[in-house]
Structures are given as C-alpha cells and as structure tokens.
Image (cartoon, grey):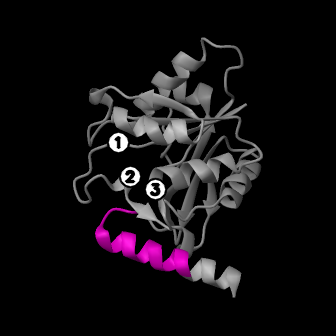
C-alpha cells in the first residue's frame, strides 16, 4: 500500500501563508491533493499541518488530516520527524503502508501523471526516489519505503537514489511572489494549449 503525505506548515519566511495561495484557481494545498487523488496507485492521502483551520481542505476533499505539533513545524524541523510520527500512528491500524510519497504543495504544476510515472519507476531498485530538474532537486516528489523512514533514513539523501527527471515547466517551486506569477503564467499557457 502507498501513503501520500502532503506537508503544509503555516509559517513561511518569504511568502506569508504560501500553502494557501492560489495557482489556477486552486490553493497550493488543494492542487497537491487533487494530483494525488488522480493517482491509480496511491491508497491513502494525509494532509499534515500545524494550522487547525486548514483541516477544511482535507474535509473538502475527503482525506485525512494530521494536526502537526508546533515543535515539528519549525523552519528547521526535519520532515522525516513529522512523517515517522504519522507512520507510527498508522501502523497501529490494519494494513501498514509499504511506501510513502511526499508531495510538497509548493510544486503546484506537478501532475498526476508525474506521480504515477515516478511510482512506476520506483519499483525498480534502488529503494528511494527523488524528482530532479536540470541536475537539481525540484522538491516535487520524494518516495521511499516506510520501513526505511522508521529506521532513520532521509527522504532527500540523493546518494544511491533513483532520479526522476521532470521538465522545467512543471518543476517550479513556490517561495516568492515572483514564483507564484511564473506558476500562474505557466498554468495558463498549458491550459490554453489544451483548449486551442
């Protein structure tokens, strides 16, 4: 089974409340949820946030919500600590997850097709996958085995990881107002290309 986790902290140094800013008429959180819900492989989706009010997005799309403790939502809090906390709670239920896929909301142009292709590639060794663009991590997709996370492995350690290449037009990582404007322009360009 595959668990998708969407981590959405309330704090942001450079762009206030960035995870609920919009691209293409949807918040960044909801774009991540919708991309995950379209996957043919993902079995469950959890939105993890330190903002209780953001549960509304989980409820709207009928997914689970994890209220993250404030100590796991600091700028320097390792995302692995948040994920392993969720995994330990989930493991008390029937059907422990084999894989965890991390989908950061700040990659709003990542598609369901990107997610499914990355999962398909992952099943070939090695046992960790990271999305890249132009020889750099783009932050869009991380996949690893849940057991490895519980044993202290990192999502972002690229040594020995499978590389999943994504094109620049789907690799933008939202950190500033300018990033938002670029993402919106790319979204409009893509949707116009589909409808023309």
Residue to which mark 3 is pinned:
28
* Residue bounds of the magenta highlight: 174-188
Verify whether residue 182 appears in magenta. yes
- What secondary structure is the stretch in magenta mostly built from? helix
Circle nearer the N terminus (1, 3):
1
170 or 191: nearer the viewer = 191
Residue to which mark 1 is pinned:
9
Q: In the visual, does 140 lie left or right of 13? A: right
Could one spot residue 127 in this view of the protein?
Answer: yes
> In this picture, is 17 found above or below 5?
below
Could one spot residue 152 in this view of the protein?
Answer: no
Assess whether mark 3 and mark 1 are in contact (beta carbons under 8 angstroms): no
Circle nearer the N terminus (2, 3):
2
> In this picture, is 16 found above or below 60?
below
> In this picture, is 72 found above or below 196?
above
Could you tell me which secondary element the residue under label 2 belongs to? helix
Residue to which mark 2 is pinned:
19
Could you tell me which secondary element the residue under label 3 belongs to? helix
118 or 19: nearer the viewer = 19
Residue ID at (38%, 52%): 19
- Could you tell me residue 120's position as x and y percent? 76, 50
Assess whether mark 3 and mark 2 are in contact (beta carbons under 8 angstroms): yes
Alpha carbon of mark 2 to alpha carbon of mark 3: how far? 5 Å
Residue ID at (45%, 56%): 27
Residue ID at (26%, 51%): 12
């Amino acid at each position: 089974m595959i668990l998708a986790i969407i981590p959405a902290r309330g704090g942001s140094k450079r762009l206030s409340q960035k995870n609920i800013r919009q691209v293409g008429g949807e918040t960044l959180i909801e774009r991540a949820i919708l991309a995950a819900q379209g996957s043919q492989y993902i079995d469950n989706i959890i939105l993890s946030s330190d903002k209780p009010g953001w549960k509304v997005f989980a409820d709207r799309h009928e997914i689970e919500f994890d209220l993250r403790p404030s100590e796991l939502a600091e700028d320097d809090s390792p995302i692995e600590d948040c994920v392993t906390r969720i995994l330990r709670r989930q493991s008390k239920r029937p059907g422990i997850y084999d894989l965890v896929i991390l989908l950061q909301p700040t990659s709003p142009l990542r598609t369901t097709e990107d997610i499914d292709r990355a999962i398909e590639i992952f099943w070939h060794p090695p046992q960790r996958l990271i999305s890249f663009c132009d020889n750099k991590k783009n932050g869009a997709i991380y996949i690893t085995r849940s057991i490895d996370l519980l044993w202290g492995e990192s999502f972002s350690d690229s040594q020995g990881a499978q590389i999943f290449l994504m094109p620049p037009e789907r690799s933008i990582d939202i950190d500033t107002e300018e990033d938002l404007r670029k993402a919106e322009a790319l979204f409009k360009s893509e949707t116009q290309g589909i409808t023309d």
